Amino acid sequence: MRPYILAESNWDYLKQAAFELAILPWGATEAHNYHLPYATDIIEADFISAESAKIAWEKGAKVIVLPTIPFGVNTGQSDIYLDINLNPSTQFAIINDIIEVLNRQGIHKLMIFNSHGGNDFKPIIRELGLKFSKMFICASNWFQALDKHQYFDNSGDHADEMETSLMLYFNPELVLPKEKWGEGKEKKNKIASFNEDWLWTERKWSKVSEDTGIGNPRLATKEKGEKFFKDITQKIADTIYDISKANINDLYT
Ligand SMILES: [Zn+2]
């Protein structure tokens, strides 16, 4: 039993435990190019949150990782077979209910550990932060924690070289052989401003990618995945430690 993983913990241990920070990993169930499993975002959330929590725990952080939520916002993938969509309003309801438990039981810090680009927790945190004034709620995107270009040759944001490298490291038996890998070619919006940060519309996924991937996975290796994993978990662990020890009423200098 890992004492920082709720799903593995038992009442004998938990009845006298006291945590400072809860971590809620959040994935998605969706196509990842031809070659990666639908649970890719869940597997990444599981591995990366558990290792980060382990390092922080060993440093002395009282942190507990909740079970990973397996479904994410996939509103733009409605025509892709068995991509399971959870609406933002459903996410709001789930987080509201989880925070009610934490708040009642005196765990006043929550980190949402996001693993899926379509999930956007900021508006939810703003609204629930107002409702639960004792709670400190933050959201993290592990995939933005380090500069990917230092680790991977080809950029991308879905089933790309980074995700394929991580999956080759975590669960190589779930990755199809290389001849099945699509190129992950992204089609750009004809209206140029949509390709800049100031203007946004949801991408209709089946229109922007043939194989559902964005980013060429061709140069992915297990070794790249392992190195990236070691570095991001170290960085995230340090941050988890800092949040768990911080006085949330005295955060700014
Ligand atoms: Zn993914």
Image (spheres, rainbow, N blue to C red):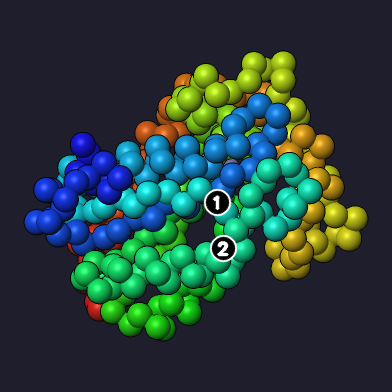
* Crowd around label 2: few <14 · some 14–19 · many ≥20 (10 Å): some
Can the viewer see residue 215 in this picture? Answer: no
Please report the residue visible at 21 percent of the width from the left and 71 percent of the height from the top: 106
Can the viewer see residue 172 in this picture? Answer: yes
According to the picture, the residue beneath numbered tag 2 turns out to be 120
> For ligand 1, which image quadrant applies?
top right
Q: Which mark is residue 71?
A: 1
Q: Is residue 163 above or below residue 142?
A: above
Circle 1 sits in a helix, a strand or a loop, which is it?
loop
Q: What's the residue type where badge 2 is placed?
A: Asp
Please report the residue visible at 42 percent of the width from the left and 59 percent of the height from the top: 112
Q: Say whether residue 221 is left or right of residue 75.
A: left
- The N terminus, quarter of image: top left
Q: Say whether residue 134 is left or right of residue 75.
A: left
Please report the residue visible at 79 percent of the width from the left and 48 percent of the height from the top: 79
Q: Is residue 131 above or below residue 161?
A: below
Circle 2 sits in a helix, a strand or a loop, which is it?
loop
Q: Residue furthest front?
A: 11
Q: Say whether residue 208 is left or right of residue 12.
A: right
Please report the residue visible at 48 percent of the width from the left and 79 percent of the height from the top: 127
Question: CB at mark 1 closer than 8 A to ligand 1?
Answer: no
Sequence-earlier tag: 2 or 1: 1
Residue 23, given in percent of the width and then of the height, sits at 34, 55
Q: Say whether residue 246 is left or right of residue 202.
A: left
